[in-house]
Amino acid sequence: MLPLFEAFPRLIDRVSHVPIGGFPTPVIPLRRLGDILGMDGLYLKHDGSSGEVYGGNKVRKLEFILGDALRKRKKSVLTFGYAGSNHALATSIYAEKLGFKSTSILLEQPNARYVGKNLLMGHAHHARLRHFRSSASACLPVMLTLASHLIRQGRLPYIVPPGGSSRIGVLGYVNAAFELRNQVEAGLLPKPDRIFVALGTMGTAVGLALGLKAAGMSTTVDCVRVTDRTYADEKKFTRLFAGTAEWIARMDPSFPPIEPEPTNTRFHHDFFGEQYAQFTEQGMNAVRLLKESEGIDLEGTYTGKAMAALIDRAASGDPNHSVVLFWNTYNAVDFSRHIDSYDYRRLPKKFHAYFESDAQPLDR
Ligand SMILES: *Cc1c(COP(=O)(O)O)cnc(C)c1O
């Protein structure tokens, strides 16, 4: 049974959950990297291997989101992201698996090699992909897409918000905190003092912060912002945190009362760089260091920046005598064999530029 349901059995009838991933995900001690950084207890929570076909942090959210879509008897799902969105890809893959049609509305972003790969993989899983120049111009296309759904299918699709960071999606990471508590109790790692995690649409960090509180763990969440403040800031974090806590407590009154202000978070704004998905020197150095020391892959948009924050804090001596857990949110499943012989010209024309122009300099 899900650790969250074990703790709060009344939620079983209140929220829908569909098992699409593989849990619990492993905890890996990072001894070599810990030695290099002069840290006593450094661990990695490997959500990269949360799914067989495709892993990463979106799988935990989708177990609740697609569960909800199934319960509502939806036939199709519609979601949003940037062109290389891991979230849109995960949604396409698991929606198809469960028999939904899926559409992704994708915004322009800086080019990187993973963008083309994710687009091909989404297309190979029969997602309808639509490209838009900027978020300002996306409103009308969203309306048109919805209207065309209504006309063709007579019903609206299930709308999955960007990053899957609805309250329902956040439940995936509230559950993850209880999963972590079980692993601590089983002796796989000492209770972490701090968790470093990338902050994108915030669902992951909000769920962890809330779940840790509810699980009675005094761990702090170090949120490393990797998106624009439009998507991620302290105020929006608090709103999602408090809203989700209240919603869960309404469904199960045995959920502990939680102050609306999260008191177990720290925000790091200095590792974002110039813009979303624009890699930074510091981030790419962090990617290289983890690869060379531990053989684990990160990437430049999210996890490299989060690891850069951890390394920077370690250099200043801040968390060195604490138990620190790096939460790896990046897919670790190699899906290249599914797309090796896939011709990008099968994609809508507006996406071809990602294949015909160079990746950004730090990604070459
Ligand atoms: C989406 C994503 C994140 C950000 O998670 P949020 O819940 O949106 O904050 C972090 N890392 C990777 C690899 C992602 O794909």
Image: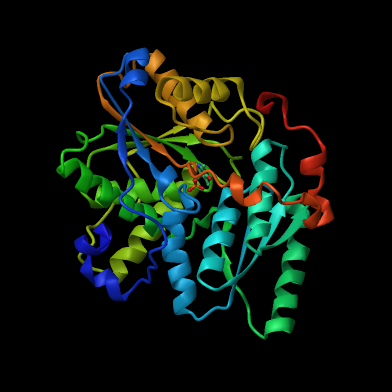
Above or below: residue 75 compared with residue 279: below
In-front residue for pair 272/284: 284
As drawn, the residue found furthest toward the bottom would be 154
On the rendered structure, is 108 left or right of 118? right
Residue 2: x and y in percent read: 27, 61
Decide which of 172, 241 is in the foreground and name it. Answer: 172
- Residue at 32% x, 22% y: name it: 319
Q: Is residue 259 visible?
A: no
Q: Quadrant of residue 125?
A: bottom right
Residue 31 or 197: which is nearer the viewer? 31
Q: Position of residue 171 (x, y in %)?
A: 37, 59
Q: Quadrant of the C terminus?
A: top right
- Residue at 73% across, 82% down: 152
Identify which residue, 221 or 307, lies in the foreground: 307
Count of numbered labels shown in the rendering: 0
Picture coordinates of residue 292, whole percent (x, y): 46, 20
Query: Does residue 165 lie above or below 17 as drawn?
Result: above
Q: Is residue 315 visible?
A: yes
Residue 314 in the figure: left or right of residue 40 = right
Can you give x and y, in whole percent of width and height, for residue 331 in the image? Answer: 49, 44
- Report the side of 353 relative to 186 (left or right): right
Which quadrant of the rendered structure holds the N terminus?
Answer: bottom left
Q: What residue is rendered at 34% in x and 58% in y?
A: 245
Q: Is residue 289 above or below residue 50?
A: above
Q: How is the image coloured?
A: rainbow
